[in-house]
Amino acid sequence: MALNLGRSVDEFLRDFWQKKPLLIRQALPNFQSTVTPAELAGLACEPYAEARIIQGQGKQFTVAQGPFAESYFQALPEKNWTLLVQSVDKWDQDVAALRSYFSFLPRWRIEDIMISYAVKGGSVGAHVDQYDVFLLQAAGSRRWQIDSGGQSCAERRYVGRSPVKLLQRFDATDSFDLVPGDMLYLPPGVGHHGVALDDDCMTYSIGLRAPSLTEMLMDFAAERAEALPDSLRYADPDLQPRDDPNAIVAGDVARARALMQQALALDSDDFARWFGRFITRYRSETLPRKRLKKPAPLEAFAQSGKLSRSRLRIDSRYRWAYAGEGIYVGGTHISLSEKTSSKLLSTGLAQDDWRSLLDSERAVLTKLYALGALSLNPAD
């Protein structure tokens, strides 16, 4: 099944992407949640899951952070609460498979797939996100109101002393009731407010990553600083006598500027490698240093008849991308052919693919397998 945007991908990217909201009726016709409410609640009880329960309405809300005890759910009221679990795609392969519907976008741009469950009246209040998001209705129905009034982020005001970042002013310009399969696309900065219209309301939020310039600069500077020798220091061998020893003169500033420019200068290949490392570790798990499992099953991949229908696949807990003759995973760059990288990230490697690899490629993939970044799974 393909994602129905109601128009061509080119038209969507030209007319709506990062420009204006779009309601898409039956983007995934008759879609049904692959995760039950009980399974989502169970995941919210696990220590590795990032979960919240938000209760309230209007501008009065409370927030509880997981993990939760099972008894916590039994004490919740009959209405006006929402359970939200981030990054469900890291732990559920069926949810991770939804990423394939958005293959017209760079895969590394997808932050995570959050699932929310709400009883009637459940909401998180009127708010704004600084990233693109696709809101897919998976069960029940939800009313979404949006404020396309055109306020800039700098003009927005928020409710003070609230555990949820609520918009102080929200003037709905549109209202949509979504049923399973419907989807609402929102570009960054559009105020929106969703309320569950019935019990067992579930929404999948496919959020896109958008690192701030501040985050990029801090990461870039930190990585560069780590690589610089301590001997590279401010120096002034051309120093001239001063009339006033307390003054900073133009020559002092020019030397400091030149030193900084020298330190931050990168050729295009070095900058591309930094960006690949940064974007695959940004708000994501980094590749571990120590081996997590023995590579014995992988060593038998080429010969074993039992594994003939298996595929070597990436672990969705990590963020992956490739560029040229290198693959990026969890902030690490590893040399690997473009052909092998592309196939590994798209369909995984079958037994015949593994047999045709160079020894050096098998060694790289064996290391990634031992680190827990790859696994052998049955073919589709």
Image: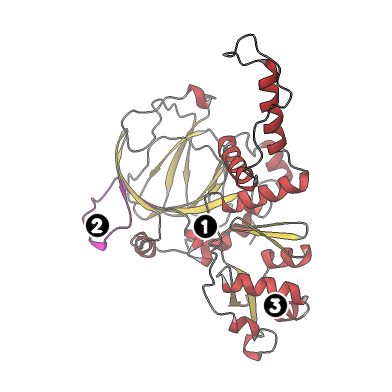
**261 in the magenta segment:** no
Q: Which mark is residue 285?
A: 1
Towards the viewer: 339 or 79: 339
The residue lying at 63 percent from left, 72 percent from top is 367
Q: In the rendered picture of this protein, how many numbered marks are placed on residues? A: 3
**What amino acid is found at the position of numbered circle 1 in the picture?**
Glu
Estimate the spatial distance between the alpha carbons at disc 1 and disc 2, rounded to whole Å.
Answer: 29 Å
The residue lying at 61 percent from left, 49 percent from top is 278
* Residue highlighted by disc 2: 72
Q: How far across and down, in percent of the image, does residue 255 sit?
A: 70, 26
Q: What element does badge 2 sit on?
A: helix
Relative to 364, say whether 220 is above or below: above
- Left or right, 119 with respect to 352, comes to left
Q: How far across and down, in percent of the image, does residue 318 sit?
A: 56, 60
The residue lying at 53 percent from left, 59 percent from top is 30
Tell me if residue 241 can be seen.
yes
